[in-house]
Image (cartoon, rainbow, N blue to C red):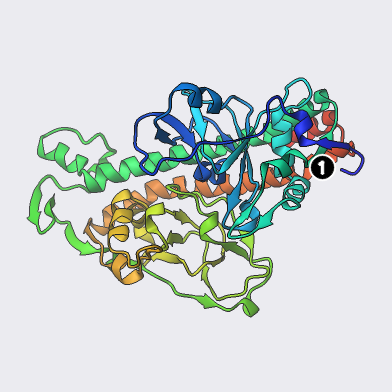
Amino acid sequence: MAEASTSPFQNLLRVPLRNGLTRPKAVRGAGIKMVNMGEIFTHDRIQNIRMDRVPLDGKEREMSLLERGDLLFARQSLVLEGAGKCSVFLGDKEPVTFESHLIRARLDPAIADPLFFFYFFRSPVGRDAIRSIVEQVAAAGIRGRDLANLPVPQIPVRQQRAIARILGTLDDKIELNRRMNETLEEMARAIFKSWFVDFDPVRAKVEGRDPGLPEHIADLFPDRFEDSEMGEIPAGWRVGTLGEVVENPRRSIKPARMDESTPYIGLEHMPRRSISLADWNSSENLESNKYEFERGEILFGKLRPYFHKVGIAPVDGVCSTDILVVAAKQPEWFAFILEHVSSEDFVNYTTATSSGTKMPRTNWKDMSGFDLVIPTLSLAKAFNVLIKPFVECVVENIHEARTLSSLRDTLLPKLISGEMRAGKSEQFIKIGVT
């Protein structure tokens, strides 16, 4: 990296840096899509994703709309590492604006490739550069004028594009894995809802229709309903509570007993509404007790449960005490409980029963008391056999994505410094992603 000359970041801009719009208190489903801090910390590459919407028109709209290639920096963060976090906007089917806690950088394409600088600011060297301008007051933050004066690599734009293309190949594969996981989650959720919420196979049998399932699975569903305290349920099933099939292993561990290389998952590592937990740190420098978890157990964020942070542990490790570890009492119930505890209904229930106003928390006692309709063990087992490969594929995709991310971050400084040439890297990448 030292071999590359530098230039102030502002020399690469087509227009001056700009802060976003003040986010209205009430945001509903009408208006222009708005990128907020949540999107920045969830998505590195922002393209055709769900966002809040805000009313916006006139000159304000014209000045604040995003263009493909715009870089977005987090002005503030409650944690030091979040300040200055950079994402790139890759376009949307609709107009998109951005909120006031973000800084937009629009580069001059004649001299600066936005994808290259997106990768630069994500690299260890780029993050070190950002840290040099972070100020810690009530929260960690950066100022636009400091970002504008930040020294960044000055290399020919042709070389920038070659480097961005190489690293983009890796990110494309990572994104493909993410979308595959998203599809697998949606498929599992749809089957769960059909079988255990809407009771579609039972209704089909009652009406004399073919349930559309393999015979050995269709035979596991009854052909009639019966009344219960939760309304009409399939005959032979029963009303129970989550705690009958789930347990909460509380394996507390002190920092002194942790190996520094042990994976650590905090709430900040958990995405919303996705069971794919692709991010974690090491337990180095942890100063308080944590909970141990095992690969394949379910992690549930109990602080502000409405954030809907529920996922599958892809490794053995330790987690924050603001996360509850959930495990099936019998392995046959794994998929059934996974879909229940990651459902909107269950998250809404934990939110409603949480204690605390500003920082509401749920607890295991309330969670275990959640009412649910419990099917036969044979059907739970069949569902588990069907869904478990989906979950295993999700975990495999997570590990592959982390390997590709590590490769990308290793290549970047070598490519910028000239230690590794683009042509040689492309051959290396082709081997790595096939």
Q: Residue furthest front?
A: 59
Please report the residue visible at 76 percent of the width from the left and 52 percent of the height from the top. 132
**Residue placed most toward the observer, 281 or 227:** 281
Above or below 148: residue 259? below
Image location of residue 419, percent across then percent down: 90, 39
Q: Which residue carries the number 1 mark? A: 413
Amino acid marked by disc 1: Pro
Above or below 182: residue 422? above
Residue 135 can be seen, yes or no: yes
Q: Is residue 370 left or right of residue 155?
A: left
* Mark 1 neighbour density, 10 Å: few (under 14) some (14–19) many (20 or more): some
**Residue placed most toward the observer, 432 or 149:** 149
Please report the residue visible at 45 percent of the width from the left and 50 percent of the height from the top. 275
**Residue placed most toward the observer, 316 or 144:** 144
Please report the residue visible at 34 percent of the width from the left and 59 percent of the height from the top. 333
Image location of residue 88, percent across then percent down: 62, 34
Q: Quadrant of the N terminus?
A: top right
Q: Quadrant of the C terminus?
A: top right
Image location of residue 321, percent across then percent down: 49, 70
Q: Residue furthest left?
A: 227
Image location of residue 307, percent across then percent down: 41, 53
Q: Is residue 321 left or right of residue 120?
A: left
Q: Secondary structure at mark 1?
A: helix
Please report the residue visible at 38 percent of the width from the left and 29 percent of the height from the top. 31
